[in-house]
Amino acid sequence: MNNKNESVTSVDVIISGLGPTGATLAHLLGKRGLSVLVLEREPMFYGNARAVYTDDECMRVMQAAGVAAELSANMQVDTPAQWVLANGKILGQYWRLDRPYGWPIINFLYQPWLETTLSDLLERYPNVRVARGRELTQFTQDEHGVTVTHQATSTFRFSDATDARQACEVDPDPQTIRGRYLVGADGGRSTVREALGIGMSGKNFPEPWLVVDLEMKEGEDALRHLPYFSFICDPDCPTVCCPQPGRFHRFEFMLMPGQTREQMEDPTVVRNLISRYVDPDKFEVKRKLVYTFNALVAKDWRKGRVLIAGDAAHMTPQFMGQGMSSGVRDAYNLAWKIDAVIKGQAGERLLDTYGSERFHHAKAMIDISVQMKDFVSMSSPVSSLMRNLLVKTVLATPFLGRYVREGRFKPAPTYAPDSYLGMPRRHRRSPEGRMIPQPEVRTFKGQRVLLDDLLGDGFALIGLEVDPRAHLSQASRKLLDIQHTRFATLFPFGTRPQGADTGRSNTSELLELEDVQGEMVAWFKRSGFSSGAVAVVRPDKFTFAMVEAADLDRAINELKFQLQWSPGSDVVAEEPRLLRKIA
């Protein structure tokens, strides 16, 4: 896939690693027309399933990358999650069926399908090249860019049953390439992070778990009795039971004192463990591996023109399914900022907000994952009994019960105060630094469309029953045009202006939208605004500002200041650039 042999002298962005984070970033940058080289050490995808879940925020990112339809076709959505006692009784469940960000909140996936789909779809971009079987060995940077040396990988994974690597005789064939930026999305043992000397803070957990990935044999129907995701709260053997699309299923078993890796990876032991829940004769064991996990976050996410993302920047325990998802959020946050800096739409200081914004949210996901781990892995009968009583009490309490049943304990897509690109929050419900909703809206042609598909990849101004353009100075309009801003007027459903004196809008200049279910109007109202307010929305669909229309110029002046934009620095985006080849 895009693994051509021709050399290149320079690209806009070099990405080390083609996991979900690197692949998502390559899509987002490729779609914006930047030239990208992805270095992936594995010569072919080796097939191990790690992530099993993603959420609505990340599917929104995939929508922005133009791959959501292909990915969602192979996902299991809206699956309830539950805590189950050792005797099979349900302690509690949580799920949400609404779609505040336009996609199902719960999406179970099979990572090999997801990764191969992401990598295959990169073929659509002539400006993106993937070099498989090539690993970054070193790099140097200066004020203008980064010079990366890479060579053929000398160790490979040959099996999807283990994570073991084997050495091979290869010609190293060292090569160098120049990039304006380098992003290390090269995993928890990141070469890029190590070379930058960036440390990590947090905790390594010694408690080992056995993961068993199963594939149901052809013609069998042996999983109908396990339709939901379950934390099995058995003090004698805490277990995770995870459905996946197709014929795949995963179990995870916590090792108890005295149990060893060698013992638990023995096929007979594995068979006995899974036989508690399924008929082992109807399945093939794809992988059985004892692992420990980490809860770590990098102290720095950027040094000069080199940045880190995904597991290179944070390692998240698996208990909330947020490891891969956090990396996808990194890619979305970073892509538009690198693009803006390269195209002269912002100063380099914008890249500092990548780490300041993502650090706190990634840390919050790590913390809730650790709390969930502690909650489900209790092995003391007394502690387990107290936990069970607590859950029953909470679920019986109206407000707290709803909070738990709807899974609202997961950190919201909100950036910490004073850490984000945007105007300060005025009160607790202020929308600045928070992701905007994504409902379906009705266009003037009568079509129902997800909001982001109309707002595009740049900044957007959404006026509630007001045309934002009418309240902009010439200087503000110039900045917004350089940013390829889209303008929209939003009406409550059924209130679009009518009559002989009302012309139909030119949608190339102004989007006139109706709020089909009232979600956006309610969002303005929760934020303390009504008719006549304007939301300034960032390319990653976080709110920069919400103001009365009369104050819009002030907000745009603040945007100009925070972007470090000056009229002499504007560079209008050109057509997608092909990789520059050596003649």
Image: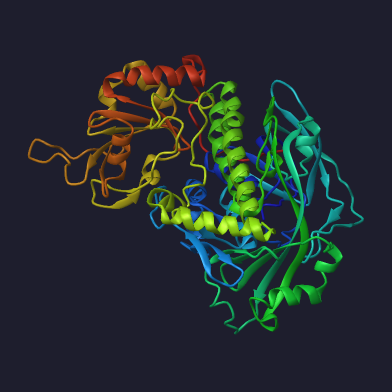
The colour scheme of the drawn protein is rainbow
Q: Is residue 117 visible?
A: no
Instruction: Kindly identify the residue that appears in the image at 30 percent across and 30 percent down.
Output: 528
Q: Is residue 147 visible?
A: yes
Q: Position of residue 284 (x, y in %)?
A: 71, 77
Instruction: Kindly identify the residue that appears in the image at 27 percent across and 19 percent down.
Output: 550
Image quarter hosting the C terminus: top right
Instruction: Kindly identify the residue that appears in the image at 80 percent across and 67 percent down.
Output: 264
Between residue 212 and residue 274, name the one nearer to us.
274
Between residue 382 and residue 524, name the one nearer to us.
382
List the single residue furthest toward the left: 500
Q: Position of residue 513 (x, y in %)?
A: 26, 42
Between residue 234 and residue 341, name the one nearer to us.
234
List the single residue furthest toward the right: 169
Q: Position of residue 212 (x, y in %)?
A: 71, 67
Q: State whether residue 408 is above or below residue 572.
A: below
Left or right of residue 412, residue 173 in this image: right
Residue 427 sits in which quadrant? top left
Between residue 513 and residue 176, name the one nearer to us.
513
Q: Position of residue 481 (x, y in %)?
A: 39, 26
Left or right of residue 448, residue 215 in this image: right
Image quarter hosting the N terminus: bottom right
Q: How many marks?
A: 0
Q: State whether residue 301 is above or below residue 204.
A: above
